Amino acid sequence: MIFQGRGAVITGGGRGIGAAVAHELAENGAKVVVSARSMNEIEAVAQELTAVGHIAHAIKCDVADENSVAMMAKEAAVLLDTVDILVNNAGIARSNPVKRLSLEEWSQIMAVNATGTFLCSKAFLPGMLERRWGRVINVASVAGLRGSSYIAAYTASKHAQVGFTRALAAEVAEQGITVNAICPGYVDTPMTEYSIAHIVEKTGVSPEEALGHILALSKQNRLIRPEEVANLTLMLCGDDAKGINGQAIAIDGG
Ligand code: NDP
């Protein structure tokens, strides 16, 4: 129960990686808030956790909306007493060649993945600074470390998330707070199911062929499990990880 007494907010906590992170943190003693736009999903995760004796709440929030983030932060502070851990995991992915990428799609992806990370960090930072302890984990992507075709907006948003991680880490390094990014390769979540469906729709290949195309990008020829990302998050949140700051750690099989 290494996080007993700690409060944690996980954005995008209704499914996939965020739900796995919420389970891992709660199972290790943290009180958690799971947040996203779909109330049914976050309520289901919070109920699963409370049913086995953990403290968990669901708060609806759109991370791209400053007012929504401010309201979520206010409510989370009341429910958890303190928010010591913030996992900026909410994200969306779309693919399109740049010549067909609309300004609307670009802006939407940047607003959720990059601006959402900034808004949530800004909202929870004052409490962490006051208590001189905090952990901010930004779930970025290997797309935040390199470029690949047809995902320019996603890649730019994830590079922004990694850049923000490094800058904020430098800013708060002397104040007991660490800020790190996790950069997964393809993970076995609904987002990857969506990507497979998109490849099938755009190219006419079978779902198995689309999955094969994705697996070929992994040196281990497999999808990362959400629990692997959750375990790395847990490690970075611990007191023993206080020397790890401003890093962007790939978890993609090498
Ligand atoms: P999922 O699509 O499975 O889940 C995404 C979560 O984010 C959902 O809970 C969704 O809920 C929430 N979300 C989306 N938009 C918003 C918003 N505007 N405000 C609040 N919440 C939002 O994705 P994954 O679990 O796969 O991905 C989680 C993170 O990991 C993302 O940042 C993604 O970019 C990153 N990642 C994923 C990889 C993968 O292969 N799956 C690989 C590398 C990185 P709702 O729609 O209800 O709001």
Image: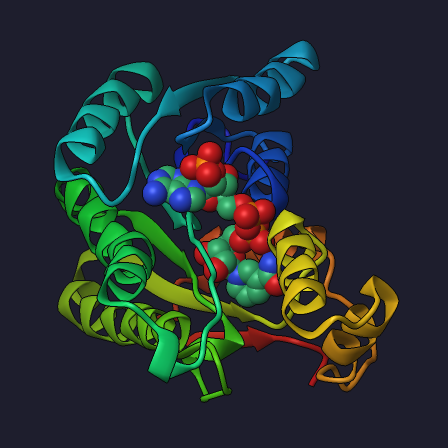
Residue at 29 percent across and 23 percent down: it is 76
Residue at the spot x=34%, y=54% of the render? 136
Which quarter of the picture shows residue 212?
bottom right
Horizontal and vertical percent position of residue 43: 53, 17
User: In the rendered image, is residue 11 in sight?
Assistant: no
Q: Residue at x 74, y 81 (%)?
A: 218
Asked whether 78 or 100 is in front, the reply is 100
- Classify 235 as above or below 167: above
Q: Residue furthest right?
A: 208
Tell me residue 184's x, y (percent): 58, 69
User: Quick check: 78 above or below 4?
Assistant: above
Across and down, in percent, residue 250 comes to 56, 77
Taking depth in this image into account, of 57 and 142 the one nearest to the observer is: 142
Number of dots carrying numbers: 0
- The reply, left or right, for residue 237 in relation to residue 225 is left
Q: Position of residue 153 (x, y in %)?
A: 35, 72
Closest to the observer: 146 or 251? 146
The N terminus appears in which quarter of the rendering? Answer: top right
Lateral position of residue 58 relative to residue 83, left or right: right
Q: Is residue 225 visible?
A: yes
Q: Residue at x 27, y 75 (%)?
A: 166
In this view, the residue in front, 118 or 148, is 148
Q: Quadrant of residue 28?
A: top right
